[in-house]
Image (cartoon, rainbow, N blue to C red):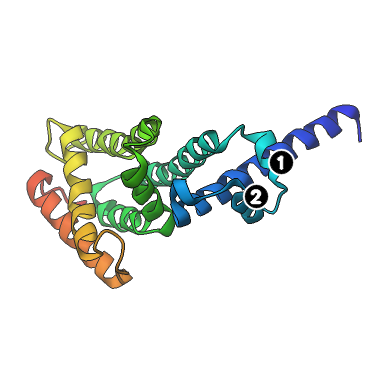
Amino acid sequence: MSTAGVDTARSRGRIDKRQAILVAAFTVFAREGYAQACVQAIAAEAGVAKPTVYNHLNDKATLFRHAVTAAADRVHAAGVAVVTRLADTGHLRDTAIHLLRMHAAPESIALRRLLHTELSRHPELLAALDCANQVQHALADRFARLSLAGHLSTENPDLAAEQFLALLTGPWDARSRLGTRPIPDQELQAIADAATHTFLATYGTGHPLE
């Protein structure tokens, strides 16, 4: 292998190890909270030596910030990917179900709990909340396109996106008791059906695609 190839492999290995540490750190912080979590436990979760963690991330606070931000990026990038596939209102129910399943996923629940618990002590985590808005912005963009195509009737796609997400997450939060009670997939589908019906009753145009 050439020198350039060796350097590339080392760089990739370092990136992979850093990602593994961040995933492990999020797991430990979500399980134990910031105050109780220790770097030794994170190193054990990641399968690396404690000094390796410090080599990649300087201290516990930095590790926490990067771990939460990385988790937020993963969760919300998945949501944006689902939303950008929304081509017409006939697929709105499928989009609703996928968004609900992601909202109910363990990593997503853990992320929200950590943010609610630690935000007052770690205001730098506001960046993770800004990341969450990416899903709403992507949905607003889809709704604007559908409105221009005559499939929806809204002059404020941002508000429509906010309301559609609230129709999904509000009932789930209430029924699951903020993620402490498992919700069967059949019930998730019922929530998605109701949200889609209510949304289209307000913003639909009666287009054949609906």
Identify the residue shown where x is 58% and y is 51%. Answer: 24
Identify the residue shown where x is 51% and y is 41%. Answer: 67
- Quarter occupied by the N terminus: top right
Q: Nearer the viewer, residue 8 or 147?
A: 8
The numbered mark at residue 52 is: 1
- Mark 2, Cα crowd under 10 Å, few <14 / some 14-19 / many 20+, is many
Locate residue 9, reporting x and y percent.
Answer: 79, 37
Residue 86 seen anywhere in this rendered image of the structure = no
- The answer for how far apart the CA atoms under marks 1 and 2 are is 8 Å
Q: Secondary structure at mark 2?
A: helix
Q: Secondary structure at mark 1?
A: helix
Locate residue 3, reporting x and y percent.
Answer: 89, 28
Dots 1, 2 in contact, CB < 8 A:
yes
| Amino acid on which disc 2 is placed | Ala
| Amino acid on which disc 1 is placed | Thr
Q: Which residue is mark 2?
A: 43
Q: Nearer the viewer, residue 154 or 184?
A: 184
Identify the residue shown where x is 27% and y is 46%. Answer: 88
Residue 113 seen anywhere in this rendered image of the structure = yes
Residue 47 is left or right of residue 71, and the answer is right
Residue 96 is left or right of residue 17, and the answer is left
The numbered mark at residue 158 is: none
- Mark 1, Cα crowd under 10 Å, few <14 / some 14-19 / many 20+, is few
The vertical placement of 45 against 6, above or below, is below
